Image: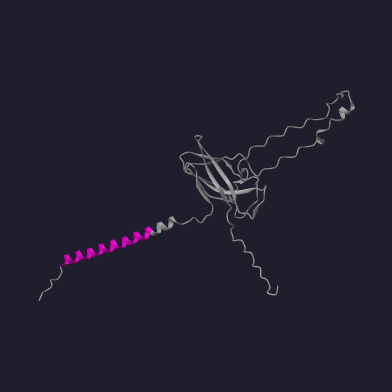
Amino acid sequence: MTRSTPATPLARRTLLRAGLLATAALGAGLLSACGAGQITQTNNQVPAVPGINVNSADGQVALRDGVVAYADEYKTGSTVPISVRLFNNSTQAVKLTGVTSDSGKFVLVGGAKPAAAAAAPAPSSASPSGSKKPSGNASASADETPAADRPVAAPAPTSAGSSNISVAIPVNGVVVLSPSTNTYLAVDKLTGQPLRAGGALKNVVFTFTYADGKTTTITLPNLPMTPPLTPLPKPSAVVHNEGE
């Protein structure tokens, strides 16, 4: 008969330490696997904010959440506001200096506008006191119509904003241009067909100028309209009577 030898205290401590190390290694492996799964899932998620996200041609300027403000319809000739966030990831200051589109001319609404030129005073038709009117044909004098009665040219159509677009973006800074901030970009007068819900502005190009004079661009083939805050009502079904 073989008699078992009782384990010494040192052997017990060695076995206990080995068991704890094995348990810790197993737990670390499980946590690592779970963490890897979460990172992969996060990378595949789509941002909840709708809009276009594009970087400039040189990768230094980023445009985020670019959308057209929602409306049931923008009629031809109406103003179409857009919303964008612009990030400057370069090492120097940069300015947004122009925006073009196939859908119409862009203007900056709410920014500083150039001062209007003062109108020249109309020449006075009154004769100096005590002077005599020159003699001559009476009909020639009759043609001298007072300035107040002369026809005035029709005023030029008003613009929604300034065509002089200049928006500074500091280094590592962001600028939000949106109707909610009261400073935004807009198509001054929509050309072509009306823009309805679900539509988009075509070929929108943003031009940026760095402090050293170099330029870069961001091109959006389509700038979509943001969806409405609440879903549009579904059309009601038409039910015909069986006797018809």
Would you say residue 99 is visible in this rendering?
Answer: yes
**Up/down of 78 relative to 45, above or below:** above
Q: Is residue 119 above or below residue 227?
A: above
Q: Considering the whole magenta stretch, tell me its main secondary structure.
A: helix
Task: Check if residue 208 falls in the magenta segment.
Answer: no
**Residue 34: % across, % down:** 37, 61
Residue 25 shown in magenta: yes
Relative depth, front residue between 80 and 236: 236
Please give left or right for residue 118 compared with residue 98 in the image: right
- Which residue is at a point 43% across and 55% down the rendered structure image? 43
> Residue 37: x, y in percent?
39, 59
Q: Which residue does the image show at 40% across and 57% down from the upper left? A: 40
Q: Which residues are magenta?
A: 8-36
- Image side of residue 214 versus residue 34, left or right: right
Is residue 178 visible in the rendered structure shown here?
A: no
Q: Nearer the viewer, residue 78 or 17?
A: 78
- Where is residue 29 shown, x and y percent of the image? 31, 60
Question: Relative to the observer, which residue lies in front, 52 or 134?
Answer: 52
Q: Residue at x 35, y 60 (%)?
A: 33
